[in-house]
Amino acid sequence: MAYEPVIGLEVHAQLLTKAKIFCSCSTRFGAEPNSHACPVCMGMPGVLPVLNRKVVEFTMKMALATNCRINEACNFARKNYFYPDLPKGYQISQYAQPLSEHGYVDIELNGGKKRIGITRIHMEEDAGKLLHDEHLPSSYVDLNRTGVPLIEIVSEPDMRNAEEATAYLRRLHEILVYLEICDGNMEEGSFRCDANVSLRPKGETAFGTRSELKNMNSFRNVQRALEYEIKRQQYILESGQEVIQETRLWDDSQGVTQSMRGKEEAHDYRYFPDPDLVPIVIDNAWIEEVKKSLPELPLEKRERFIRDYQIPPYDAGVLTSSRALAEYFEEVAKLSGKPKIASNWVMGDVLRFLNEDKKDIRECPILPQSLAEMIGLIEDGTISGKMAKDIVVDMYRTGKTPKTVIEEKGMVQITDETALEKTIAEIMAANPAQLEQYRAGKEKLFGYFVGQVMKATRGKANPQLINELLKKMLAKE
Amino acid sequence: MILNRLTIHELQKLIRSQEITSSDIVKSVFERIDAVEGRVHAYITLMKEYAFAEAAKADKDIKAGNIKPLTGIPIALKDIVCTKGFLTTCGSHILHNYIPPYNATVVEKLKDAGAVFTGKTNMDEFAMGSSTETSYFGITRNPYALDRIPGGSSGGSAAAVAADECIASIGSDTGGSIRQPAALCSVVGMKPTYGRVSRFGLIAFASSLDQIGPFTKDVEDCAIMMNAIAGYDPRESTSVPLDVPDYTACISRGIDGWKVGIPKEYFIEGIDPEVMEAMQKAIKTIEGLGAACVEISLPHTEYCLAVYYIIAPAEASSNLARYDGVKYGFRAQDSSDLLDMYKKTRSAGFGAEVKRRIMIGTYALSSGYYDAYYKKASQVRALIKRDFEEAFATCDAILTPTSPTPAFKIGEKMDDPLQMYLSDIFTISTNLAGIPGISVPCGFTKGGLPIGAQFLAGHFEEGKLIQIAAAFEKHANLEKRRPVL
């Protein structure tokens, strides 16, 4: 029997607000344990939460960017469970009334498009972290992360294979980073993903029994874990057994998913509205205000680049992969007036340099103005494309403008006809044999003369001018 | 002149005229504590050294003419409000060693008004009880009858004021925990509107019901205390940003032309006949002040107890989850693993009544029961609130007994939780509706046990409560008694 996988993803993204969701502690990552933990973070008796409105605004941004409906009123609920990294014994989350629902994003697959539904996006607080020391019988609790704002993005079970799931995940990641509300770092856990996977016979509409996959901390691991889990369930079904509803952990080193807890051990979280917080009312004016603050989203930008700059879809995809890169490219394109050439330089040399140094475009020593200037210098013949390849290396290394680099190196292209004519005449005089052969019809020797001129001018002569003059002078008897 | 017997406003006059110092008052209070605390046991922790140091500071302010409404006045705090650097136990073994790193807003406000704290008063564990018998630190006795309970859960705060072991005190009221002990100890106790006094730093029992309020020797002192503690707090989301009127201005306004509702559901069988008699007299007094007493109906009254005993334990089961032995407080030793530590810590750290309520609450919130219990209770709660809104559309205030009976004997109801829960039958609805209530002394039984009358008003109408309670206090012509200790 042919089976069809059904996949839904739950994504948690840490928001880049300066302060935590329910107190004014810093959200900064990597500080000394418990140095960003106040009595509210520590769940001290008597403390109360006060909502950071920036968190609502950031969540609204994501909701609007993913076509969700924002509910007029929403509230917080307590999710009750015991764990040492959860100081209050409950997590403040949203349950029956989330901030937003019923959205979607479009993903691209081998040229085709597919729409993936988003069930809901809600706000919640992150938990702390346990630090284990293998040599000690006890563990430590670090509450710096407690109360860092999270949004949970729950998809519809709309994905049918691992590729679709990772494409969807990348799309969410890209939007979050574009909105500058999440840094998207999967290894540090600021972007995390759980997956629900089940299989059903092709053509069947009811869902099969699902497993929930956790602990996949990279796009690659999400893909591998899903592929493994689909195969595992397929094997179970094909051998006539039944899939058990359970939570499974991805084991990266072994490349397998392993059972963590079954349905019987599943928590009853006893959700109820948090009486310490009041309902959040979001009116149209607020929604409009947030809408206005939204940047152009990656997909729109990609389409605009293809349309306005006449660059290939592939280039547009690379150049819009981050907002900063897109901005960099656009500036170079606009200042130089040569978008395609700008795209070649950015995608070619600039990105190569940055990749080699593992640097971000925001750290690029070549300013967009400089790159545009360089393109202009090629265009007006001041330098050759070949010279530019060297110049750009220096520009990257020193951060200097192309003009400075050219001046310092004395690299200006020779465009003085009389000077060049004199050089050519000297070369012709020094190579009578070759000249004779050329004139006898051995036209291949033209390249030889070009090389000689380049050598004599140390590559500074304008190639077009060399061609022109050589043709004229070699032809003369 | 026995200073510890005086009221805030009496002492303030003497302070302003520089006849006495704060140190004199504090000395008098601690002498009284030394004399009677062994019998009453109102306090869990005394802050004697601190109190004298603060009194000395207050005396400098007094000399400098820098006198605030509570300057130099010794005030006791229920051991449920967090005091930076001072033990705050909530009457529980699980917090027996807990010293908060911060002050509750109410503590800060009282300090700002000049108050001097005498100590932390005894209470039912986590405010769960009506008799102060569930405290881990032993019982408190009613100063008017040492074989009886002082009421609860703020029994220590009520007894401390009644026994003159402080001038005024702070309590908390989730279902009657200020008003019922006030009635049983013949003092004034107010539960303000939900959102009127900040809950920040109040150890939570049931977050949607908890409210801090004062115990005082008379209504004017209640107004002075309310002036000091009421007001918006940005640290509490449910705090209401409304201006606070000067409550002392309400003292002498009278209630001529008022309409006072007498809810028929509150005058029922089972009320102690002497309490009933005192209430009839109270109605006469009110009428004598130019107000009309009219029978009204609060039709959903019969559901109050049931609704309360779902909502309060549900919230408590979640609020008390943080006491897990991980971060602070008691932790059981010799646990084999994490789960074992949780179980041993919470089994040994909580008393029976707290455990009972955690279990009730956990059950009420469980998957499959939520709709039938918590959700339904929340819906009925809205109806109870509406009952009051409708009543206050026509009435200025409502009068009821505070407690169906006077103080009962120690141990009498400990084995019968339902009987214990019934002690709060007239006070619970107030918390469910979020409205303010005040209990004022309303005479004594023939046996010398205090009786209290409760006035209720609409949201943020504490001023009206002060107004009617002050008028009643002035004209009720009640028997004057002092506890014999």
Image: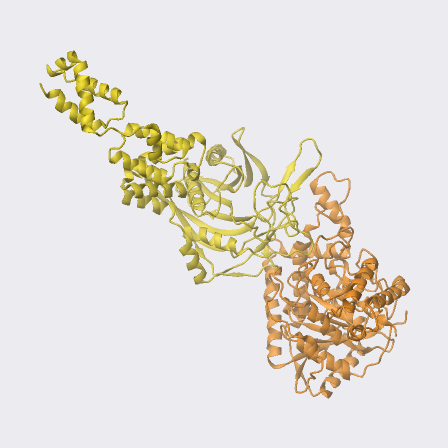
Chain colours: A yellow, B orange
- The structure residue drawn at horizontal position 45% and vertical position 60%, both measured from the top left corner, is A286
Rendered-image quadrant of the C terminus of chain A: top left
Which of A252/A54 is in front? A54
Residue at the outermost left position: A477
Give the percent coordinates (x, y) of residue A398: 41, 32
Q: In which image quadrant can residue B301 be found?
A: bottom right
- The structure residue drawn at horizontal position 62% and vertical position 78%, both measured from the top left corner, is B391
Look at the image and tell me whether residue B200 can be seen.
yes
Give the percent coordinates (x, y) of residue A106: 38, 46
Look at the image and tell me whether residue A109 can be seen.
no
Which of B219/B472 is in front? B219
Q: In which image quadrant can residue A160 be found?
A: top left
Q: Is residue A215 above or below residue B366?
A: above
Which of B351/A123 is in front? A123
Q: In which image quadrant can residue B69 be found?
A: bottom right
Give the percent coordinates (x, y) of residue A233: 49, 35
Rendered-image quadrant of the N terminus of chain A: top left
Q: Is residue B340 shown left or right of residue B32?
A: left
